Amino acid sequence: MEPITSAILAVLGKLADKTISDGYAALRDYLLKKYADSELDKALTDVESGADDSSTARLDSALRHSGASADSELLKRAVALAGRGGTHIEMHGHHNAAVGENHGTLNIDLRGD
């Protein structure tokens, strides 16, 4: 899973918090203005409507296809937003990320993507 997708999923359930909601709106706006990709827009909308394995995979694919997954500024913003929502995302090299919330850590191996 792309670290940006992980960050988005981490905050979607916390949008009732105005700080998180405003931050997510800014992240989404940055993403869609910079990449102006209809598949990315649709993938975000699908995940926002209810994240499941299929919508998450489509978002990962759209992020890679648009080039957004390699955007260091976008990654920095997404990780910071997740942190404000109580989720820690730690990058390990180019292929691994660790995502943790108060109950431990989930390691995500991105090799092969």
Image (cartoon, rainbow, N blue to C red):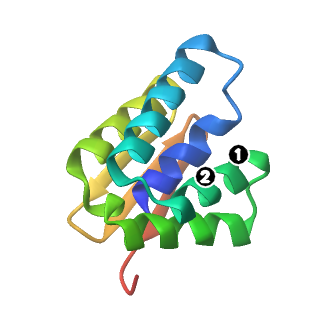
Q: What element carries label 1?
A: helix
Residue under label 1, please give it: 48
Residue found at the far right of this picture: 50
> Distance from label 1 to label 2 (Cα)?
6 Å
Left or right for 74, reference 102: left
Between 92 and 5, the one lying in front of the other is 5
Estimate the x, y position of residue 111 in percent, counting from the top left: 36, 81
Estimate the x, y position of residue 4 in percent, counting from the top left: 43, 52
Between 84 and 62, the one lying in front of the other is 62
Instruction: Please tell me how many numbered marks the rendered image carries.
Output: 2
Residue 1 shows in the view: no
Q: What element carries label 2?
A: helix
Residue under label 2, please give it: 44
Estimate the x, y position of residue 29 in percent, counting from the top left: 45, 35
The amino acid at mark 2 is Leu
Q: Residue 8 carries which label?
A: none
* The C terminus: image quadrant: bottom left
Rendered position, 85 above or below 113:
above
Left or right for 89, reference 46: left
Rendered position, 34 above or below 60:
above
Residue 54 occupies quadrant: bottom right
Mark 1 neighbour class, 10 Å CA radius: few under 14, some 14 to 19, many 20 or more: some
Left or right for 88, reference 76: right
Mark 2 neighbour class, 10 Å CA radius: few under 14, some 14 to 19, many 20 or more: many
Q: Residue at x 55, y 65 (%)?
A: 39
Q: Answer yes or no: do the residues labelled 1 and 2 have beta carbons within 8 Å?
A: yes
The amino acid at mark 1 is Glu
Q: Which residue is drawn at 71% across and 69% down?
A: 53
